Amino acid sequence: MFFYQQTPADRTGAAESATPTATSKASYISGSGAGYVDSESCIPCHQRIWETYQHTGMARSFFRPRAENVIGNFEGEKPFRHQASERYYTMHQHGGKYYQRRHQVDFDGKEANVVEKEIHYVMGSGNHVRSYLHLAPDGTLYQLPVAWYAGKDGGYWAMNPGYDRALHDGFRRVVDTGCMFCHNA
């Protein structure tokens, strides 16, 4: 499990602030030095419990993306267009790592305002939705704008809740302990 603590002063609520401040550093309060312990580390002492746990949605609620556990198309799919903000999002993988990329189209029809973030964690079992998270070098965890939603024909890409308007947080929505408590614990 991955836990961290962030003080209320660290969350300014400024949706369009350009970069996180030095005070937004997270303090790890349990877990490995990297802040995450995969549930497979429980097998040596709790194999029976681990085996039954694997049949629950909670077992798939927080993990690092790997080829055997991702759902949604990360290969050559047409970019998802968010009409309200006129931004385009592409999910792709390269070298065993997964990414979410945003761009806009300028007046000449060329890509502009490109931002790309690595997906370090997936939150959500996939029974309903999977959100993608980026871990910044300072230890701050951010929710990425596009999620994968379960549905007919294998599911679809769409904006996370709160991102469905023109002015949204972009790649700057901090995931704090409150988010983790409800969506991961």
Image (tube, rainbow, N blue to C red):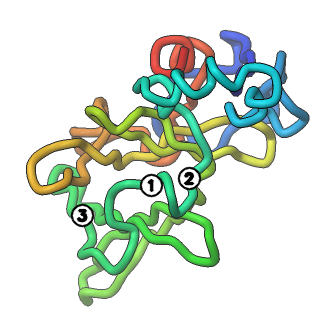
Q: Mark 1 is on which residue type?
A: Val
Query: Which is nearer the eye, 102 or 17?
Result: 102
Q: Which residue is mark 1?
A: 70
Callout 2: helix, strand or loop? loop
Q: Position of residue 32 (x, y in %)?
A: 86, 31
Would residue 36 be visible to someone looking at this image? Answer: no
Front one among 52 and 64: 52
Q: Position of residue 49 (x, y in %)?
A: 62, 18
* Place of residue 174 in the rendered image (x, y in percent of width and height, measured from the top left): 57, 31
Q: What residue is pinned by disc 2?
A: 65
Please determine whether, in this image, residue 17 is positioned above or below residue 23.
below
Q: Position of residue 100 (x, y in %)?
A: 46, 61
Give left or right: position of 125 versus 141: left
Tag 3–tag 2 contact (CB < 8 Å): no
- Frontmost residue, 30 versus 86: 30
Spatial separation of the CA atoms under disc 3 and disc 2: 20 Å
Position of residue 103 in the picture relative to residue 185 (left or right): left
Of residues 17 and 137, the one nearer the viewer is: 137
- Report the residue marked by disc 3: 80
| Residue shown at 29% from the left, 31% from the top | 161
Please give the name of the residue rendered at 80% of the width and 32% of the height, measured from the top-left corner. 35
Q: Quadrant of the C terminus?
A: top right
Horizontal side, residue 161 vs residue 6: left or right? left
Contact between marks 3 and 1 (CB within 8 A): the answer is no
Label 2 or label 1, whichever comes before in sequence order: 2
Which of pointers 3 and 2 lies earlier in the amino acid sequence?
2
Asked whether the beta carbons under mark 2 and mark 1 sit within 8 Å of each other, the answer is: yes
Rendered residue at 53%/22% (across/down): 53
